[in-house]
Image (spheres, rainbow, N blue to C red):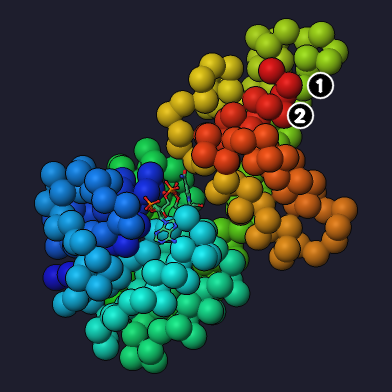
Amino acid sequence: MNRVAFLGLGRMGAAMATRLAQSGVDISAWNRTAGRGEAAAAAGAVIAKTPQSAVAGRDLIITMLSDERAVAEVVGRLAAEPGATVIEMSTISPDAVRQVRSMLPAEVGLIDAPVLGGVAQAATGTLHIFAGGEPHVVDRCEPVLSQLGTVQRCGALGSGAAVKLVVNLANISSMVVLGEALRLAGALGVDPDTAFGALARTALGSLAQGMRSRIETACVPVMFRTALAEESARLIASADGPADSVAMAVHLQLRSAIEAGLADQDVSAAIRKMAGS
Ligand SMILES: NC(=O)c1ccc[n+]([C@@H]2O[C@H](COP(=O)([O-])OP(=O)(O)OC[C@H]3O[C@@H](n4cnc5c(N)ncnc54)[C@H](OP(=O)(O)O)[C@@H]3O)[C@@H](O)[C@H]2O)c1
């Protein structure tokens, strides 16, 4: 049986580590800030005080951290055992995945495996996982990853990260378009019930329905921080090239939400700001 180390118990990481422990996986978990591992510990995870103690004797090491900087900081200090495999699941760029590769010894394996789905899907093992890496290395990771969701093999190392950015362009730009559609509705005097009812018939339908109550009320609980949406949009805009791309416009909108102090609020707060309500 695999012995797993899980590094990063934020919103997603805590739910994923708990899910793995509940599935009977032997897991040791670490988070930079103490006190975020209670649910995982209650499900049977051992909470480690340092990343080094978390990875000692572990053959699979999962990282689920906010961004590229966090991943580089944590991986840079790792003493993974020869023969171990790192499964990098944060949303980072393909270049950052290759940088992680260069930071690890050759005898430590690496795959990138970012996820589609949020905290609810993490908790129920229904994420969609975009895996990049050599097939035999992905093979080693699949039994554990399949406890978290469906694994889609995307190709060579970095290809999972690439597909995740493609998917996030669709998802995050849809959120921004939803904010603009609601602002347009307000400007034209269309009441919210009519606007949401009409939007339900469009490509934004399920998004509008799923986010309506959080956009209109308190934007809680925080499920996906605006800062993470903005970071994703930044990665997409830098990969996407033209200055007049949709990706760039989406990034600028989210940047302005950050400047308005919404970084640690749910992304629904940014949509609400865009909607002008
Ligand atoms: N939330 C979602 O719905 C969702 C869905 C799909 C993918 N994702 C992606 O999954 C990743 C995690 O998202 P999340 O929502 O779980 O984020 P989060 O709740 O903000 O948690 C971020 C995690 O990263 C850690 N971290 C940040 N900087 C660090 C550093 N320098 N050194 C060590 N640890 C550091 C945090 O530790 P502390 O507790 O110490 O701050 C925390 O464990 C992101 O890449 C995000 O884009 C999120």
Kind of residue sitting beneath label 2? Glu
Q: Quadrant of the C terminus?
A: top right
| Residue 110 place in picture, x, y as percent | 40, 78
Q: Is residue 61 above or below residue 109?
A: above
Q: Which residue is mark 1?
A: 184
* Image quadrant where one finds the N terminus: bottom left
Would residue 20 appear left or right of 190 to someone viewing this image?
left
Which label belongs to residue 180? 2
Residue in the picture at 56% in, 58% down? 164
Identified at 87% across, 53% down, the residue is: 244
Give how far apart the Cα atoms at labels 2 and 1 are: 6 Å
Q: Is residue 35 above or below residue 84?
A: above
Which disc number belongs to residue 216?
none
Q: Residue 72, relative to residue 149: is it above or below? A: below
* Residue that extends furthest to the bottom in the rendered view of this protein: 106
Do the numbered discs 2 and 1 sit on residues whose CB atoms are within 8 Å? yes
- Which residue is painted at 83% across and 53% down in the image? 245
| Viewer can see residue 235 | yes
Residue occupying image coordinates x 73% and y 58%: 237
Q: Residue furthest right?
A: 244
Q: Mark 1 is on which residue type?
A: Leu
Q: Position of residue 71 (x, y in %)?
A: 45, 67
At label 2, counting other C-alpha atoms closer than 10 Å, the crowd grade (few under 14, some 14-19, many 20 or more) is some
Q: Position of residue 162 (x, y in %)?
A: 60, 66
Query: Residue 167 placed where, x, y %?
Result: 60, 53
Q: Quadrant location of residue 181?
A: top right
Q: Quadrant of residue 85?
A: bottom left
